[in-house]
Amino acid sequence: MDPDGNMVATGQEEFRGAAAASAAAAAGGGDGGRVHVEIVQDTIETQETDALVSPMVGHYYRSTRLGSILENIVGSRLTEDFDEAAGDEWMPGDFVLVEGLPRLPSNAVFFLDLIPWDGDDDGTAVQIIRLGINNILACCDDKGFRSVALPALGEGMVLSFPISLVARVILEQIYEYERERASSTDLSVRIVLLPENEEAKEAFTSVQEELQHKESRRIVLLGKTGSGKSHFANTIFGDDLFTTHHSANSGTVSCQAETKCINGVSTTVVDTPGFFDTRRSEEDVKPEIIRCLTECSPGPHAFLIVFKAGKFT
Ligand SMILES: Nc1nc2c(ncn2[C@@H]2O[C@H](COP(=O)(O)OP(=O)(O)O)[C@@H](O)[C@H]2O)c(=O)[nH]1
Ligand SMILES: [Mg+2]
């Protein structure tokens, strides 16, 4: 069980979250809390996270393999607590949250109502998985949960989604949620795949790599020494990560790349030495230009040219 007694402290967590958010707003915006996605191969029922997600069909928690495993661990308390928490009215995409179940290392279980795959990569069944993930992550933030474990939702005999589709839908939806999210605390999402399921591992890892590249922004700053590139890079990050120089002769001599999350987007800025300085030979700057481009692999989204504002003659 959570040693912090998370369920009791929920009100306090929300208060602290709100205080941090307003502090960030007062400081001029600031970045929101991050959603960390981790892909592991393990058994989901043994995860020590604040919550687990177990899919179900037709509001019947035993309809999936994971639901039956949880019942074997928890026993009859699961039926009682589920019935108490579940309303009569429900829609696919809704969840039933059952908290404080005995013999589970996790504090809470979200039982999520899904429908079997309809053969459409962007059809109703997929939209319901997206909606369900969104609902669950929003509830984690409301409740002050810091970590949640999910299986490859929709995979398996009953729901029968293709694994590559499941990987794409789950990861896209988590990143989409991160972009819209207001909370300033970090949330850890652990995707738990069965140890023998190499196909699932490969599907999730390749989609995650692709999305991380797509989600990031890579900017290269160019301009003469002393034009204010390093100063501008610090302004972008709101932090003194790059050294600025007062004399034109002592400027940055090699590339420096830094990455930080800005408004939920991983942003890399590459600060460069004065490539356009007339006193530096082409031979001299070439290796440094190559190094600068490898820092922002697979390629920069933008080159920003920095000029020093002054009199034009
Ligand atoms: N007042 C003012 N000074 C700046 C600005 N940008 C840069 N500087 C100053 O100009 C000098 C050179 O800046 P730096 O960022 O090191 O230039 P770099 O060689 O292009 O990286 C430093 O003393 C900075 O503090 C700006 O927007 N306003
Ligand atoms: Mg510099």
Image (tube, helix red, strand yellow):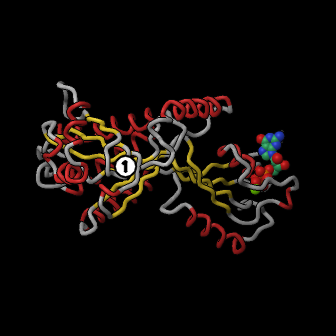
Image coordinates for residue 175, horizontal then vertical, percent: 40, 45
Q: Nearer the viewer, residue 26 or 304?
A: 26
Q: Amino acid at mark 1?
A: Ser
Q: Name the quadrant of the C terminus.
A: top right
In this view, 89 is above or below 111: above
Q: Nearer the viewer, residue 26 or 185?
A: 185
Image coordinates for residue 181, horizontal then vertical, percent: 46, 36
- Using residue 43 as the reference point, say whether residue 305 is left or right of it: right
Question: From this viewpoint, which residue is outermost toward the top?
Answer: 89
- Using residue 206 as the reference point, say whether residue 299 is left or right of it: right
Identify the residue shown where x is 20% and y is 33%. Answer: 83
- Residue density around tag 1, few if under 14, some if 14–19, many if 20 or more, within 10 Å: many
Image coordinates for residue 42, horizontal then vertical, percent: 32, 63
Identify the residue shown where x is 28% and y is 38%. Answer: 132
- Using residue 22 as the reference point, say whether residue 50 is left or right of it: left
| Location of residue 157 (image quadrant) | bottom left
Instruction: Kindly tell me whether residue 154 is visible in this rendering.
Output: no
Identify the residue shown where x is 11% and y is 47%. Answer: 119
According to the picture, the residue beneath numbered tag 1 turns out to be 106
Query: Which element carries disc 1, helix, strand or loop?
Result: loop
Image coordinates for residue 285, horizontal then vertical, percent: 70, 69
